[in-house]
Image (spheres, grey):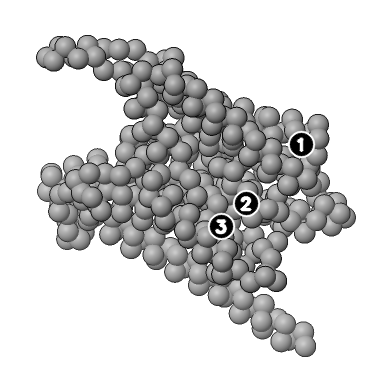
Amino acid sequence: MNKEVDILYKQSRKRKFYFIYVTILILFLTICFSLCLGSTAIGYSDVYALMVGKASDEAIQIIINMRMPRIVAALLCGWALALSGSIMQIILKNPLASPYTLGISNAAAFGASVAIVFGSFAVQVPQSGDFITVVNPYAVTLSAFAFSLLALFIILLIMKSLSRDSHTIILSGIIISSIFAAALSGIQYIASSSQLASIVFWTFGDLSHVDWPDLLLIFVVLLPISICLYYFRWNYRAVSAGDEYASSIGVNPDKTRIIGLILTTICTSVAVSFFGVIAFIGLVVPHIVRKCIGNNEEFLIIGSALVGSTFLLLCDTIGRTILSPITLPVGIITSIVGAPFFLILLLNKKKNETYY
C-alpha cells in the first residue's frame, strides 16, 4: 500500500515538473513569435543573426530598442500580477482574491490620476501654437505606488480592528475599490480634456512607455520579493489548511497573512504604477494553473508566474498586431480574453470540486 502511494506521489510530481517544463518552452516560443510580429517584418533569421552578432542596424534597432523592452515588460508585469494573485488566493483561502478585487489596482489608478491632474502643466508647441499637457512620468509612478500602499494600509487596519476572516478582507477590498473608483471619477470630472485623455489611456494598461532602466528597476524589486514568497510556500500551505492547523505546527497565521499581503501589494503596486491597470491576470491565471497541477504551492507559485508572463505576452502581441498599425492597450485585451475565460472555468467546475 505504501509503495503504491509512493509511486502515485512520484508520478504526480513528475506531471507537475512536466507542466513547468512545457510552460517554459511555450514561453520561449511565444517570445520568438512576438519578436517577429509587428508593422516591420522581422524574420527568425534576423533574430538568429542578432544572437550571433551579425544582424543589420535596422534589425538591432527594432528588436533591441522597440520590441524587446515591450516583451520584457510583459514578462515582468505578468509575473508580478499572477504571482501576487496566487499568493493572495492561497493565504486568504478565497478564489476571488486578486490585486484588482482587493482595491489595489483602483487605488493605483486614482494615485496616477492625481499626479496627472495636479502635477501636469501646459506647454505651447512653437510650430502650431497648440498647448499640450506634460506630466512627469516618475511622479505618476510614485503617486500610483503610494496610493496602492495606502489601500493595503486600510485593509490592514480593518483586519486589526474588525476581523481577519478572508471574506471580510475581500469585502473590505471591494469597498475600497469602489471608493477609489468613485474618487477617480471625480478626478476625471474636473480634469481638462488632455488630462482626461492621459488618465483614460493610463487606466487601459500599456507596456510601451518603459525603457531598459525602468525594467531593471522593476526586476530588482520583483526578484527578492518572489524569492521570499517562494521561500515561505510551506507557511502558506499551512495557513490554507486552517489557522488551528497552522498554529499547531508553529506557523503564525496572522503574521503570515500580513507579510504575504505586504509583499504581494508591493509586487503588484510596482507593476501597476509602471504599466497601468491590467485586469484579470491575477485572478484568472492562478485558476488556470490550479486546474492543471492542483493546489501544491511548490509548483503553483512558479507555474502562476510563468503562465502569467506567457498569457500577458500573448495578449500584448494580439493587441499590437490584430489591428496593425493601430495598437490596442493590453488591458483591453486581457479583459476581453480574461472575463469569458474565467466564466468558462467557473461553469466547468464540478459542484463537489474545491480549490482550497
Q: Nearer the viewer, mark 2 or mark 3?
A: 2
Count of number-bearing discs:
3
Give the residue drawn at x 62%, y 51%.
Answer: 96
Q: Mark 2–mark 3 contact, CB under 8 Å?
A: no
Which badge, 2 or 3, comes first in the chain's sequence? 2
Q: Mark 2 = which residue?
A: 96
Position of 293 relative to 264 (above/below): below
Left or right relative to 17: residue 92: right
Give the answer, above or below, for where 192 lies relative to 246.
above
Determine the residue positioned at 69% across, 66% down. Answer: 354
The secondary structure type at the circle numbered 2 is loop
**Image spot of residue 117 (x, y percent):** 42, 18
Q: Where's residue 97, x and y in %?
A: 63, 48
The span from disc 2 to disc 3 (Cα, nearest Å) is: 10 Å
- Marks 2, 1: nearer the viewer: 2
Label 2: how many residues lie within 10 Å, few (<14), some (14-19) or many (20+)? Answer: some
Q: Which residue has dot 3 on it?
A: 286
The residue to which callout 1 is attached is 159
Q: Of 80 and 290, which appears nearest the observer? A: 290
Q: Are marks 2 and 1 in contact (CB under 8 Å)?
A: no
- When the figure is inspected, residue 52 is found, relative to residue 158, above or below; the finding is below
Q: Residue 62: x and y, percent? A: 19, 45
**Distance from the alpha carbon under mark 3 to that under mark 1:** 24 Å
Q: Position of residue 290 (x, y in %)?
A: 59, 64
Kindly tell me whether residue 64 is visible in this rendering. no
**Which amino acid type is shown beneath numbered disc 1?**
Met
Is 113 or 300 nearer to us in this picture? 113
In the rendered view of the protein, which quadrant contains the N terminus?
bottom right
Mark 2: amino acid: Leu
- Residue drawn at x 43%, y 17% is 190
